[in-house]
Image (tube, helix red, strand yellow):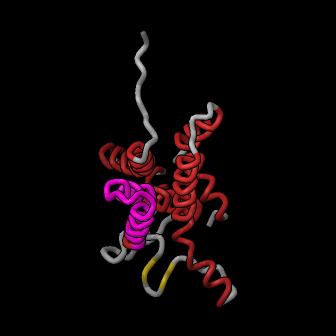
């Protein structure tokens, strides 16, 4: 398990690098109002919280049991898509409280889910898989072990499929964050040369 600060930094500076760039640029050019600053801070705090969301049981277990066991709440794995549905739900509630618009609330939920999935991505890289598909499939799956698929033992079709799935998962997280950020006011446009 990477340290909590690694999860937050990975999400903020790798997955949401565009938001950081836009916020810093707006600050430097003095284009940011106090209201906008509060919304950007809320967005980054929400992303940071949900980047740590799967490890919430670690804090509880450290205080109560004196260990850092963090992968289960009862029988439900916290590093699963089922538990990730709570990230979407809670992120949507936070978005609705902040914006009072259902559309923006949904995008905040998508942003929270992207943060949650970035946590799973880092933990998968360091620990080698989790019960992502619980309760449908209770076995451990590792996205990064798929990237290590060899051509010789798998054949061309299986090699290409495994390579595509692993890269697609990483791209999906980044695209979810970019989509949500775009709908929450971070505009990304191509400027044609004149």
Is residue 141 among what the camera can see? no
Residue visible at 47% across and 70% down in the picture: 79
In the rendered image, the vertical position of residue 139 relative to residue 118, given as above or below: below
Q: Could one spot residue 57 in this view of the protein? A: yes
Is residue 90 within the magenta segment? yes
Up/down of 98 relative to 188, above or below? below
Q: Residue furthest top?
A: 194
> Where residue 43 sits: x, y (%)?
52, 54
Please provide percent x and percent y for residue 52.
Answer: 57, 66
The magenta span reads 83-112
Q: Position of residue 143 (x, y in %)?
A: 45, 57
Depth check, front residue: 131 or 120? 120
Q: Residue at x 38, y 60 (%)?
A: 100
Q: Which residue is found at the position 42% from the left and 21% from the top?
A: 191
Q: Main secondary structure of the magenta part?
A: helix
**In the image, residue 22 lies in the stretch drawn in magenta:** no
- Of the 4 image quadrants, the one containing the C terminus is top left
Q: Quadrant of residue 111?
A: bottom left
Residue at x 65% of width, y 57% of height? 6
- Left or right placement of residue 10 versus residue 130 in this view: right
In the current view of this chain or complex, which residue is farthest to the bottom? 64
Q: Position of residue 165 (x, y in %)?
A: 37, 50
Between 84 and 109, the one nearer to me in the picture: 109
Residue 136 position by quadrant: bottom left
Closest to the observer, 153 or 167: 167
Q: Quadrant of the N terminus?
A: bottom right
Q: Is residue 144 left or right of residue 65?
A: left
């Amino acid at each position: 398990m990477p340290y909590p600060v690694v999860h937050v930094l990975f999400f903020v500076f790798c997955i949401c690098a565009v938001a950081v760039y836009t916020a810093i640029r707006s600050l430097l050019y003095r284009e940011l109002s106090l209201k906008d600053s509060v919304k950007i801070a809320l967005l980054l705090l929400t992303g940071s919280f949900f980047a740590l969301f799967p490890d919430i049981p670690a804090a509880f277990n450290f205080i109560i049991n004196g260990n850092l066991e963090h992968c289960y709440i009862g029988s439900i794995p916290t590093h699963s898509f089922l538990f990730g549905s709570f990230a979407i739900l809670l992120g949507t509630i936070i978005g609705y409280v902040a914006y009072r618009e259902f559309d923006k609330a949904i995008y905040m939920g998508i942003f929270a889910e992207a943060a949650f999935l970035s946590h799973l991505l880092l933990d998968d890289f360091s620990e080698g898989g989790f019960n992502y598909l619980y309760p449908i499939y209770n076995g451990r799956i590792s996205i990064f072990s798929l990237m290590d698929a060899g051509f010789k033992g798998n054949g061309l079709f299986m090699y290409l499929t495994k390579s595509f799935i692993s890269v697609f998962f990483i791209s999906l997280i980044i695209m979810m964050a970019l989509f949500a950020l775009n709908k929450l006011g971070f505009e990304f446009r191509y400027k044609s040369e004149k």
